[in-house]
Image (cartoon, grey):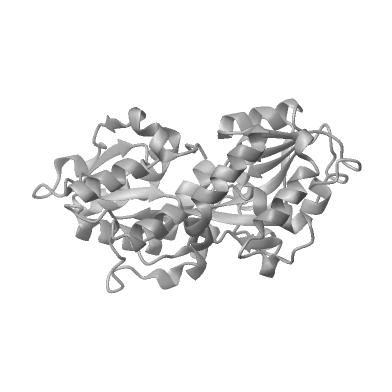
Amino acid sequence: MKRVATAAAAASAVTLLAACGGAAAEGDGGKELTVVMWGGADQETPVSAGVQPWADAAGVTVKQDSPSDYAKFRAQVESGRVAWDVVEVEPNFAHTACTNGWAVKLDATTVDTSLVDPETVGECGAPLLEYAFTIGYNTEAFSVENHPRTWAEFFDTEQFPGKRGFWKYATGAMFEAALLADGVAPGELYPLDIDRAFRKLDTIKDEIVFYETGEQQQQLVASGEVPLIQAWNGRIFSAAQEGQPVANEWNEHLLSYDQVVIPNGSPNADLAQEWIAWYLENPKAQADYANAVAYGPVNDAALEFVEPDVLEELPGAPENAAKRAAVIDYGYWAEHYDAVSERLNEWAAR
């Protein structure tokens, strides 16, 4: 998944895209929905698979803006000049936006959240996709039979030599992995013992290489420069599909997800609620999205429509789900993100 390290940093890159084509372009009495996601292929695919079919049937014109920008989101709400209707965000921001009144609460009479994992639902946020932080490895450096299968082994640079890659982002599961490696039970991860996590990270600090984009992640592990990396499962899958020597290890993976929220003051909030309800109830649309990008559907009913080679690389596949260590607690991160981010940057610079 193409991610921005901080959405505010991408403010200058916001670009208005043309309305989608198809039947919805004619509209129905001027009904419109403005969708905001991360931009590029990470927007084109979910819109074409997961928004446009609904819009075509409902006679709605889909407009787009990108990328998701938290500072702009807040500024629109606080100024009372809201141009966005549905925005893809990280769940810690959804939590913060809901707490501060920047986002609209989901309407339980319209949106049936019982169809998805309750851990991925917030008062204002509905899940759009699932992905996993896995142990990604270079298959020329480590074989299928002999590679780290736990975070403790990932941190063992004697048994498994080489550089280690992490996303330089507080919510990127680095601290959860460090605590699992240090012996913390999965069910006891939260609240995170950040001091203990940093002590564990200190043990391999000289071997750590940080990445900031999915492209960097793929290049580092595929080249062998960083033969072991804490990966986004879809990035490893797509690189492997292109013939790169990489693979995911699913044991002890950490589940993450993105949510969609409705800015408070959206001119089309009712339509946004209708689309969210349709998406959660539509496994075929979610499967089409998953088949294109190898990020998981949020409704398990979609799994039967996922192609077999993709299914085996999704966090929701039964065999993989059984190996899960934990779901990232974004309520925790909503409270602690700023402080931990500052400390991470200081630590990395030393």
Q: In the displayed structure, would residue 244 be above or below residue 55? A: above
Q: Residue at x 43, y 73 (%)?
A: 114
Q: Residue at x 62, y 65 (%)?
A: 190
| Residue 137 quadrant | top right
Q: Quick check: 143 left or right of 176? A: right
Q: Foreground residue, 203 or 222?
A: 203
Q: Residue at x 79, y 41 (%)?
A: 204
Q: Foreground residue, 278 or 229?
A: 229
Q: Residue at x 24, y 56 (%)?
A: 264
Q: In the displayed structure, would residue 345 be above or below residue 327? A: above
Q: Residue furthest left?
A: 29
Can residue 313 be seen here? Answer: no
Instruction: State the quadrant of the C terminus.
Output: top right
Q: Position of residue 34 (x, y in %)?
A: 25, 44
Q: Position of residue 319 (x, y in %)?
A: 69, 61
Q: Position of residue 228 (x, y in %)?
A: 76, 38
Q: Position of residue 105 (x, y in %)?
A: 30, 65
Q: Foreground residue, 3 or 158?
A: 158
Q: In the displayed structure, would residue 188 be above or below residue 168? A: below
Can residue 291 be seen here? Answer: yes
